[in-house]
Amino acid sequence: MKVLVIGSGGREHAIVDALARSAQVGKIWCAPGNAGIARQAECVAIGDTEVEKLCDFALRNGADLTVVGPESSLAAGVIDRFREAGLRIFGPTKAAARIESSKEFAKQLMAKYAIPTAGFRAFADYAEALAYVSARPFPAVLKYDGLAAGKGVVIAGTLTEAEAALRDMLLEDKFGAGKVVVEDYLEGPEFSFMCFVSGSRVWPMVLAQDHKRACDGDRGPNTGGMGAYSPLPFITAEDEQFALERIMQPAADAMVAEGCPFEGVLYGGLMKTARGIEVIEFNARFGDPETEVVLPRLKSDIADIFCAVADGCDAQIEWHDFATLGIVLASKGYPGTYEKGCEIGGLDEMECTVYHMGTRTEDGRVVTAGGRVLFVVGRGSTLEEARAEALRNVARIRCENLFHRTDIGHRAFE
Ligand code: AMP
Ligand code: GLY
């Protein structure tokens, strides 16, 4: 099989790595890829939203399957375009991807199908939203309705903060013209439950937890994720069964009932609250960096799963028992401004899996090319062993412009 992967981060590197382990995959391209991906796939200089060029490439080169990483490609309509051209592609149509791209669509779907989530109301009008928020307890959870690269959620502790956020979202259209969803505030540990979904068929993946804040102790600004691990000792088998039977399966069924069946990875961003497991958000794609700790645990052939989802047939999915824990090395200054082009040394001395998140090759050297740069994955029979392996290998990387968290997985060690 010849497979095209779309994207350029750690998630796509993990997908390429899983495909490289498949007995039936002979050729892998990645568009646009990065310096690490280039060791396992042929990188193609096409951006992840250049839909026509991607489609043209897949047609000309006879790609048997295309796998999409980022939400930006989904929002650009890559799935719909490939299908129209008769190409086999793994991912949800634009209509199905609304479960991620529109918070209001997702909240209404959950309300209609009794999927547990925080109570909410949607507003297009600034004054109405402000009046509603003023009359309710704080903190207030305010979410911009559309895609906002992870920056569209504000947990406002005071009315002044809420006012500023609503002004940005509704009066100044900072993320574009769109509504705001105001939600009840929930508390508890969050975790990520990704499932392969093909219409009403749902195959669960092993659970993972991401760490969104930039600094140790879950402090500092929100980021795209600074580390992740799997499995999760604080989520019981009953919790997992509840999440599958009362959240993920009903969500897949609801999409079928609404006339936009979901195909691809449905990602439940869930919270274990005092009253049970509830949905914080759905994503329509593999999580990043969760994928980088989940796919190494996949025992089955990932190409079989992608094809089963795309073709609507059955698949068996098996997982390894070992634990994985991964640490992000990010450019100093991230998630704010940071330098690029800094040389990375020590990559050849690594004794564990390393996924590249934002790197490129310059005159034969690997240099930084993004906010999140590398993802170092330790594995072991326990999370402690996995963490020790990750930390040991992080220390081998030589680059003055990188920082990392040292407490990834802390909830599991408390
Ligand atoms: P989202 O983009 O919807 O996942 O929200 C980003 C982050 O905001 C989540 O990971 C949570 O930490 C937090 N958050 C979102 N919704 C709520 C809520 N209803 N209650 C408490 N925290 C929330
Ligand atoms: N790790 C969170 C996400 O992929 O959205």
Image (tube, helix red, strand yellow):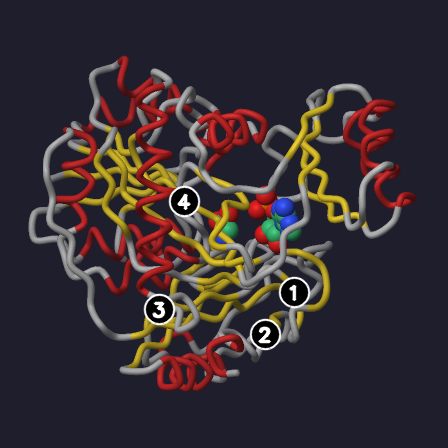
Residue 368 seen in this snapshot: no
Dot placed on the residue nearer the N-terminal end, 2 or 1:
1
Q: Find the distance from the CA under tag 2 to the CA under tag 1.
A: 7 Å
Q: Which residue is mark 3?
A: 231
Front residue (pair 40, 107):
107
Number of residues whose C-alpha sits closer than 10 Å to that of mark 3, classed few (under 14), some (14–19) or many (20 or more): many
Dot placed on the residue nearer the N-terminal end, 3 or 4:
3
Left or right: 401 in relation to 294: right
**Residue placed furthest toward the top:** 84
User: Marks 1 and 2: in contact by CB < 8 Å?
Assistant: yes
Q: Which residue is mark 4?
A: 267
Q: Secondary structure at mark 4?
A: strand
- Residue type marked 2: Arg
Cβ at disc 4 under 8 Å from ligand 2: yes
- Residue type marked 1: Ala
Dot placed on the residue nearer the N-terminal end, 1 or 4:
1
Q: Which residue is mark 1?
A: 214
Q: Nearer the viewer, mark 3 or mark 2?
A: 3
- Residue type marked 3: Pro
Cβ at disc 1 under 8 Å from ligand 2: no
- Residue type marked 4: Tyr
Q: Secondary structure at mark 2?
A: loop
Q: Nearer the viewer, mark 1 or mark 3?
A: 3
Q: Which residue is mark 2?
A: 405
Number of residues whose C-alpha sits closer than 10 Å to that of mark 1, classed few (under 14), some (14–19) or many (20 or more): many
Dot placed on the residue nearer the N-terminal end, 3 or 2:
3
